[in-house]
Image (cartoon, rainbow, N blue to C red):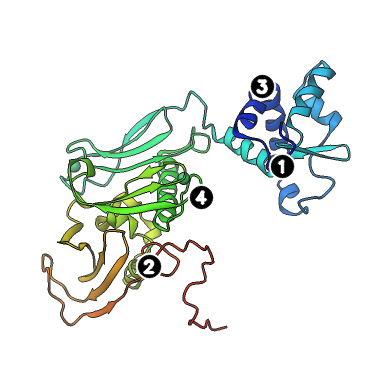
Amino acid sequence: MSDTDAGPTPAEAFAALASPVRVRLVRTLGETAADDPAAITFLPFDHPDRGLAYSALRERVDVADSGRFNYHLGELVGSFVEKEGDRYRLTWLGALAYRFLVAGRFSADPVPRRFDLDDPCHRCGGRVEARYTADQLLYVDCTDCGLRTMMIHVPQHGVAGRSHEALLSAGAMRYRTHVRSLTAGICPWCSGRVETAVAEADDETRGQPVATHLCRDCGGVYFPSIGAALLSHPAVVAFCHARGVDLRDYYPWTVPFAFAPDHAAVTSRDPLRVRVDVRLAGDRCRVVVDDRLTVRSVAVATDVADGDENGGEQGDESQCESNAHGPGGDEPNEDGTGAGDESVVWDG
Ligand SMILES: [Zn+2]
Ligand SMILES: [Zn+2]
């Protein structure tokens, strides 16, 4: 185990857990904290009563040979485990490793399931099915035309043995969180820098334009629809909210402007412009993005007839160059200040 400030190398970290005894040690210390939420919520992080005394830890991990127990414990101290006085507890890294174990990310036996969803396919009106695989991936697919609206990793632990609804809710929340982070230019897997582009429709992209997100640091990729990438854009959220719709109440795959096959239309190729129409209560919010998913314009029109492409001249149009990547500016905010528009003075 490295004793530098840099912490363990990946090889050292994985090696440190390549022992059933050490995994048990991490689990035991993690369960101790999980069994006693007060230990986390109310005690200061460095409170001396956090963690387990040596004798209690040894008893719970149940290793008869004290030399062997001490050896394995010693391998963890300094990285996953810290010792203060007589007490041992997980470091932040150790707590992360524990959550990893609890989430069952490397478990071999998630229980696959498959069940029908209530809402019909946006494209063909056919049957939509949810499928949870042994890889812990949740898919939402049309069984008739094959339209795939979602694929997201859902750790099995929290959903094993729970209702289909619980699985869908977890998947929907993870999907939103991932898409929001990617759209903001921050990798949800490694916190690295995400490169975003808009790809035109082809067979690979389910016949509709999609956002393509690629993490330059870990190679993670994701391809949400343009509408899905706009689910958290303030103009869209405000438009829906003003018409009595809280988008958080809907599973992403049931939102027509996020997944209907004609929801996004290419209106110009050079420069690339893709238009998404959010239609609600007879009104329309038209959002136009460019080839980097930057929102180029937002136009709200009232009393727009179905299929009326250019109606609603009376609508209130507000041009903007805000970025679907928040916060602020045309570029993802690489300096990470999140300062927004400095000219804005908040009340209160
Ligand atoms: Zn279909
Ligand atoms: Zn990454």
N-terminal of the pair, mark 1 or mark 2, is 1
Q: Amino acid at mark 4?
A: Ser
Q: Amino acid at mark 3?
A: Ser
Residue 191 bears which disc, if any? 4
Q: Nearer the viewer, mark 3 or mark 4?
A: 4
- Distance from Cα at disc 4 to Cα at disc 2: 20 Å
Q: Which residue is mark 3?
A: 19
Within 8 Å of ligand 2, the CB of disc 4?
yes
- Distance from Cα at disc 1 to Cα at disc 4: 20 Å
Quick one: label 2, few (<14), some, or many (20+) residues within 10 Å? Answer: some
Quick one: label 4, few (<14), some, or many (20+) residues within 10 Å? Answer: some
Quick one: label 3, few (<14), some, or many (20+) residues within 10 Å? Answer: few
- Distance from Cα at disc 3 to Cα at disc 1: 18 Å
Which residue occupies the foreground of this view, 120 or 327? Answer: 327
Q: Amino acid at mark 2?
A: Asp
Is there a contact, CB below 8 Å, between mark 3 and mark 1?
no
104 to the left or right of 175: right
